[in-house]
Image (cartoon, grey):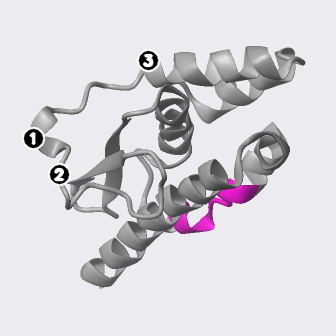
Amino acid sequence: MTSIDDIRENFELLDDWDDRYRYVIELGRTLEPMPEAEHSAENKVQGCVSQVWLQKLVERDGGAPILRYRGDSDAHIVRGLVAIVLALYSGRTPQQILETDAISVFNEFGFRDHLTPQRSNGLRSMVERIKTDAREALAEAS
């Protein structure tokens, strides 16, 4: 998976939004395949116009739990947005997830001005789903 720092650097190199859209679509192609069985109602993210699924995997090795995700969408651009969300959050502790401000990163990338309101709402829905998972994991750990 591409790191959020690599994504940030690549966005800085691309001035044209057509190139940025192509890059986001390319990021979606790098997602780890999600088993068809995981395209379930439980994993479906509500609030997205396109279909989006996030599968949560919790790793516990004595310390704070680590939340890892697989994600998928039926739309190419959204699949790329899923890849960006996972670069921000997957592989982190619940506390790190809750401290990460995705909206400021999305604004830095220019998404506010270049995504439709529906896509922006979908991004927020993905982030809120992951933050809810993080809050639940913290509650279980205490």
Q: Are marks 2 and 1 in contact (CB under 8 Å)?
A: yes
- Identify the residue at image location x=74%, y=21%: 20
Give the mark nearer the N terminus: 2 vs 3.
Answer: 3
Badge nearest the viewer, 2 or 3: 2
Q: Give the numbered dot on residue 40.
A: 2
Element type at mark 2:
loop
Element type at mark 1:
helix
Magenta span: chief secondary structure = helix
> Is residue 13 on the magenta stretch?
no
Residue positioned most to the right: 15
Residue 39 place in picture, x, y as percent: 20, 44
Q: Residues within 10 Å of mark 2 (few under 14, many from 20)?
A: few
Give left or right: position of 87 versus 57.
right
- Identify the residue at image location x=63%, y=59%: 100
In the rendered image of this protein, does residue 7 appear above or below residue 71? above
Residue identifier under label 1: 37
Q: Give the position of the C terminus as an image quadrant.
A: bottom left
Type of amino acid under label 2: Ser
Residue identifier under label 3: 29
Type of amino acid under label 3: Arg
> Is residue 101 on the magenta stretch?
yes
Type of amino acid under label 1: Ala
Q: Nearer the viewer, residue 99 or 32?
A: 32
In magenta, the rendered stretch is 96-103
